[in-house]
């Protein structure tokens, strides 16, 4: 049985509230410039430490040992889905990142404008990295292309990149890239990977043929390639699975999109953490589960800025009062993955987890750091198990096999 | 998706080197004669301790909690294969142990000479444990037996034990034991367990019929039984999967055979650890992954010789300098399983793991012992995940779902 179906089969309803405070890219790495401490170990966070001494700590492995996740799999795992089974394709991720609200029947692809020579062979895979504005202009040449059988939408992303969205009945995303992935080759026709996707591949080719006609003679963006054809996986929602009325407090489109994919309401909130918490207070009575996404720690990690990541952890810590004051039945503080400043990128290292609930087995943790969490009472588990643990601590799972 | 295929799908190449130092049977057990310390806790190993303080520690569960592995599954797991799915049969293991270089199309079986009475019923399952020399003599009676459809090779192992190797086209190893496993029963004809193995079972019976004729009248080895019919599992190689040029520095045939099964080159080296390290230095530039097998700790554990196992750990520690000096990007020191002197056998206890790499999250370990590793920052994971972790620390895995 799929993991979420198993947890779902045990789910019961009550009025206990669950809050997940997700600190994006939370996990860090020992940094030689800072006494071999991680960002979380270096930061001063008395309020998180106080929570640790009331709760229990552990570690989450985002996907499997050694595997560095993108945001898609990392979040789906925290939402209780197996991140390998529910892999999100590049086209869908790109669309989520610019805030497109998709249907699971849509097919999405990531598009690149490129430059081809007279024979049609690619000579620049990024069309000289045209500006987003030029990208918009080129897309406007293509927007009135009609393809019988589906509706096509085009959305600029950045530079030479755009999203192709196809809407229709019986579309299927099992289509190979038209992007040959190298200079010197011609863009390939869209090839169906299964019988079910043959019609959709035909629509793609009908669109591309017309698009190439219209782009001809432009410079440098005189052609396009598509890749990452995909559909939003059919993910059951939190209410359907667990009877949870759920809401997300996120600032970036990508995270709103991922939360929406599991059926969360997206609440409008300001940019700052304090704004997010004010929105939380306002809607406290209307939901059972809240997902709060704190983005800045990840960006600082990506920039390699150790001290700035430290400061953003400290800022969050100093503002957390209103959340603690609401006394959720279960509060989890964790990340989606590690983004160590030392690596300037996402990484595979396990993520610190802090769980506060009256049903926690206190483990003697007195601070919230990687080294404490690695020895914490919750042990190390894959992120996909967190959802079951949250439901359990909210007394929302009945006994199995009783 | 199979685990190794998943890791493979993310693998990229670079020039970072991985070394696995495998101390066979490393894990021990608290011993009442030695202050309830394990062998590793009792031993003095300042160099391993120094590595621990630069790296991170954890524990490997060889197969599943409670499961004691043989050398086959224990090693395959460390090489990234699921040890339950890629089970290696007794015949293949026995053949690997005496250095037979097999093809995956061969069928192997473990043979025993035995003694039967006038009715053909077994009265001694080991033929009085005849000497290896007598075993050789009996085999020489059988070597010119011809069976149309396949070639048969016979190799003495030790005492009454030998290996039967069948080479041919379309052979299949799904054949039941001819060994009834008890005194008083007659050897059974070889029975095909699937339709595909019917022809092979026929060849076995053609061989056995002739062999029994020739053994008749000898004493005490006047018959034979076969068991553990098996074929080398079709295991993809390290280069094909991960782009790793890999080499093994092992002394015993079994470990050379297991390493060869995943595509490693087998490097000639002397018997001592220092010789192995000299060979490592010589070939350092030619490979990306080195597997160094240190055998003696396991043998001492099997003998129940606590202090001798301690001494061999200390000997390894005192000789490890040249390996550390090569500064591999990733160095893992671990075992294939535990062989506690207190049990005089392999055991199911998790195996200490020490990982040293610039991308380690230092966990405050200052010694390398079971009790430290059990609280180490890497947590406890199944051995089959080590391969992914090694690749990650060598920055040889790309982001999943980005």
Image: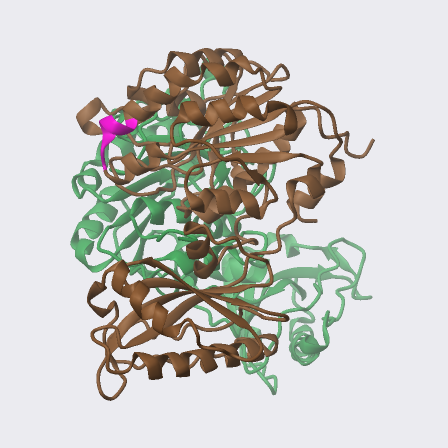
Chain colours: A brown, B green
The residue nearer to you, when weighing A299 against A95, is A95
Principal secondary structure, stretch drawn in magenta: helix
Determine which quarter of the picture holds residue B353: top left
Residue A155, visible in the rendered structure = yes
Determine which quarter of the picture holds residue A133: bottom left
On the rendered structure, is B367 left or right of B144? left
Q: In this picture, is B329 found above or below A167?
A: above
The residue nearer to you, when weighing A347 against B302, is A347
Magenta span covers which residues?
Answer: A304-309
Rendered residue at 44%/23% (across/down): A373
On the rendered structure, is B364 left or right of A365? left
Q: In this picture, is A111 found above or below B278?
A: below
Q: Position of residue B111 (x, y in %)?
A: 61, 63
Q: Position of residue B104 (x, y in %)?
A: 50, 71
Q: In this picture, is B369 found above or below A180?
A: above
Q: Position of residue A45 (x, y in %)?
A: 36, 15
The residue nearer to you, when weighing B233 against A216, is A216
* A36 is within the stretch colored magenta: no
Question: Where is the C terminus of chain A found, in terms of image quarters?
Answer: top right
Rendered residue at 29%/29% (across/down): A309
Residue B29, visible in the rendered structure = no
Q: Position of residue B263 (x, y in %)?
A: 38, 63
* Label tally: 0
């Amino acid at each position: 049985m799929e993991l979420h179906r198993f947890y779902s089969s045990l789910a019961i309803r009550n009025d206990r509230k669950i809050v997940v405070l997700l600190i994006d890219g939370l996990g860090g790495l020992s940094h030689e410039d800072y006494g071999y401490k991680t960002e979380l170990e270096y930061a001063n966070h008395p309020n998180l430490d106080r929570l640790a001494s009331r709760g229990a700590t552990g570690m989450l492995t985002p996907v499997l040992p050694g595997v560095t996740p993108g945001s898609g799999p990392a979040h789906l795992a925290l939402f209780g889905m197996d991140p390998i089974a529910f892999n999100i394709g590049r086209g869908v991720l790109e669309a989520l990142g610019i805030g497109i609200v998709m249907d699971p029947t849509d097919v999405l692809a990531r598009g690149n404008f490129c430059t081809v020579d007279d024979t049609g062979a690619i000579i620049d895979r990024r069309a000289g990295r045209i500006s987003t504005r030029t990208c918009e202009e080129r897309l406007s040449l293509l927007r009135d292309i009609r393809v019988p059988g589906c509706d096509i939408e085009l959305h600029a992303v950045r530079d030479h990149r755009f999203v192709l969205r196809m809407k229709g009945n019986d579309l299927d995303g099992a289509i190979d890239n038209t992007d040959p992935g190298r200079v010197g080759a011609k863009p390939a026709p869209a090839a169906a990977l299964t019988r079910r996707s043959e019609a959709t591949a035909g629509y793609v080719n009908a669109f591309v043929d017309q698009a190439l006609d219209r782009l001809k003679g432009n410079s440098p963006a005189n052609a396009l390639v598509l890749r990452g054809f995909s559909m939003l996986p059919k993910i059951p929602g939190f209410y359907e699975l667990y009877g949870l009325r759920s809401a997300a407090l996120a600032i970036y489109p990508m995270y709103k999109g991922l939360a929406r994919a599991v059926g969360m309401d997206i609440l409008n909130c300001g940019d700052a953490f304090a704004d997010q918490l004010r929105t939380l207070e306002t809607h406290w009575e209307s939901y059972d589960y809240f997902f709060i996404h704190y983005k800045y720690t990840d960006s600082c990690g990506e920039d390699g800025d150790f001290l700035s990541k430290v400061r953003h952890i400290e800022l969050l810590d100093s503002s957390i009062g209103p959340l603690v004051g609401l006394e959720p039945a279960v509060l989890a503080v964790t990340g989606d993955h590690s983004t160590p400043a030392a690596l300037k990128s996402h990484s595979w290292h396990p993520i610190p987890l802090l769980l506060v609930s009256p049903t926690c087995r206190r483990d003697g943790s007195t601070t919230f750091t990687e080294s404490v969490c690695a020895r914490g009472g919750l042990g190390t588990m894959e992120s996909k198990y967190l959802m079951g643990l949250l439901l359990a601590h909210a007394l929302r799972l009945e006994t199995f096999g009783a």
